[in-house]
Amino acid sequence: MTSPSTNDSQKEPDTPPVMNERKTGWRAIQIKRENSGTMKKEPAKKEPEPEPEKEEPAIDKPVKEEEEEEEEEETHNELSMVLNALRGTVESQKKTTPREKPPAEPQEEEEEELHPRNARVDRIIAAAEAARDEAENKEHRMLEPIDTAAANDLQAESEPSTPVPLPAQFSPQQELTRTEKRRIELPADKNMADYVTPPTPGTPPPSDPAYSDQLPPESPKQKIPATAAEVPAENGAIKPNILSPREQEREDQAMLDGIDAFFNNRFAEAEEKFQSKADEDPLYALGLSSMAFIKALSTKDADHAEAAITQLTATFEFANGQILAASANKTLKDTVSHYITNLMGSNHTGLPTNTPPLSQETLKARPLFIPNGALRAHVIKAECCLLMAMLYLSQETVVGYLKTGLNLRRAYNSYSLVWQEYKRMGQEFNRYMDKDTISAIQFGIGSVHILLSSLPAKILKIVSAFGWKADKHLGFALLKLCMDGQRIRSPLASMMLLSYYVTLMSYCPQVLTRELLEPSIEILLNAQQAFPNSALFLYYAGRISRLSRNIPLSTQSFMYTYQVSQGATWAEGGMGYLATHEMAFNCVVELDWATAALRAMELQNKYGSPAFNKYFYGTCMEMLGNRSEAILAFAEATTVFVSPKKKRNQMEQFVEHRITFFEKSGYQDMDYVLPILEICYLFNLFSNMRTASLESCLEQVETTLEVIYKREKKEYEVRTLELMPDLAPPDYYDQRAILLLIKAHILNCLGQSTDAIAHLNWIVDHKSRITYSKWVLPYAYWESGVVSWYLGDLKRARALWNSALTHSGYDFEYKLAIQLNLAINHAIEMGVPETATPKISKSSQTNNGRKRLPLTNPNPLAAQG
């Protein structure tokens, strides 16, 4: 490999200006690589406190002891410190929000505040909120049209036939948009079934053969044994759980202690507690399986995912054997009756089903219910399927989505059976069911509903698990109840809600961050009270800090996560590398390409996709001006794919396609692309940047566009001087389209949405010339919707997002589908009407706006002859 100096000497005198800018920083990374053998970057050190050093030597020992005590106090309050700083960031951003007080002179504090939205959008949202509150006070009756300046402004800016969104016309499921203000309240001391009724599983909709045929024949729907004789040999000795609810709660205290140890970073202690009874109790086996599940999600390693699925399957069989052992002494009639009644539901609408209450005579007779031990085993079995579904969903493949559907349906079948039994118990449910089983129902059904509610129709069509629409507000209510119960599943419920909020804000930062930032901080504050130093919650604190554009605080949180995971066998390879990965993204947000490259090198063959890590490293090298190193990294990335071509996830497919595109020109056209900014766009990192960083990226894009223009000018000059030259006409439509898309997005982030219109129109106007980068066009529709959203034309925004959903067969298709689904649902909840699309039958004719209809027969004379 040639050195950078050699490359520089070989360059032509007219080196493109973009390459001159990319050279800076390469010497910095060379020095860092020499000085840091392990590639571990220490956090930014605080200035040393001078007070202890000024003390006399006579009291040296007490001073050291005090310092050690202070360090211990700091390590036990890391999450609290991060949350206090995060709340301060959010409060400072609120003060500069244009909805309350527009800043008069933002030049001095421009880097310290959020990029404000368009003032018109803020007025529209404020008017919509006022109308929603008024509708709630009037029991959601029809209101008069909103007579506000914001509404009139929207009417003027929209097309003539566009009605003003009327939030007062919400349906009952749309009135609970903001969960922090309107959530389904369920009393903890009452039977939940008296207040809400989840839909029964019902009959699954038919799956599309185009997708179901891709399911491997060796992975059919898992067969559930129907009789005790079908229990596997290893489960033959499984005994039924005959403990009463109160005895079970006392017996599960060790499990609760293990959960407490796990979320307080005592991973070895937690594993030891789970292992102590894993052969006797499926709940403890589920504890070990859950540790494997979290490790698989955090490492994104295929081997860890397979190991977690194996453990969850074994726990599933263990719980199922306990269920069969409990029902072995029951008559066949009773067993079949329970399963038929509870599982074979016929509810296809997704609406609650009404079950008549128990009579007083029935209550006094103390009806016989399924034993608590069997109900407990049912929810354990269901939870195994739920966790397996999440693992398959994270694979982002068609086969993974198919297996997600199979496992989600199996999970919901068991949850529904226990729910119906819980409902039959009435207000005496505490006599027949232990608190942790009730908490497990809340966690399971709530998780299924918020998981399904976030998936778009494209993925739900593949999943094909239920025939009803999920209710995310029911999911929020159940998870909140589980979280407040302080039982075994409570921290898992907190993690589920945080994952939901962070995922939504990461997918749609410009649309949803403002709404979801505060409720996510509230959940972190509740978790901090019980687990003040948890590596898991520190990770979420880092993600939320980045979404609030407080990058130093985010990096500090991830560094804390990395430090507390060191020395722990379970966490070091999971949470430690996950934190390193997030710190690499933080370096990109701060345009620190050298440190980002070092992080990528550290993660190689240790975390995530080796191909993406290599590609990411190469893009950083390109920005640093070392093209030789970048090309070498791109070439190596094509050789380190772990999965076969058909099983690669969306990210690996994108890497493969981009490298193939670079190789088409023999890497001669690298001056016309900015690969690292493409990653920033696709991972929504621009929304986390400050103004100065955004302006720097915008300058890079404009410089690269100028290089393309000069190259095209030279090639066209050849065609004016030479007749029929061998040189093909310039074709840089793909490169220009990607750069214009990035430029439009940066302008959106800077609050200059109007300036982005021309660039997005160019992409749509030249869509037929963009032949290789198919993902640009649907993303252009997405970005156009964001422009319309910021400019106040909400109906147009929703229509453009719906148009993006019609495209298929491009990189990150399912990622964008989730992004579009979240934004469209948010628009629906705000009362934005849908744009009607006229349906024209094949038999009817239309003039398409012209005065004369087209001829039915273009050559009537030939027809007469």
Image (cartoon, helix red, strand yellow):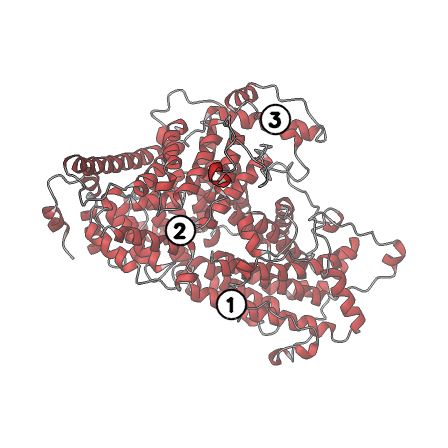
Residue 125, image x and y in percent? 54, 28
Around disc 3, counting alpha carbons within 10 Å, would you say few (fewer than 14), some (14 to 19), or many (20 or more)?
Answer: some
- Closest to the observer: 715 or 448? 715
SS of the residue at dot 1? loop
Around disc 2, counting alpha carbons within 10 Å, would you say few (fewer than 14), some (14 to 19), or many (20 or more)?
Answer: many
| Quadrant location, the N terminus | bottom left
Determine the CA span between mark 3 and mark 1: 53 Å
- Closest to the observer: 36 or 626? 626
Q: Amino acid at mark 2?
A: Tyr
Disc 3 target residue = 130
Disc 2 target residue = 560
Residue 314, image x and y in percent? 56, 71
Determine the CA span between mark 2 and mark 3: 42 Å
* 662 relative to 794, above or below: below
Which mark sits nearer the N-terminus, 3 or 1?
A: 3
Q: Is residue 639 left or right of residue 13?
A: right
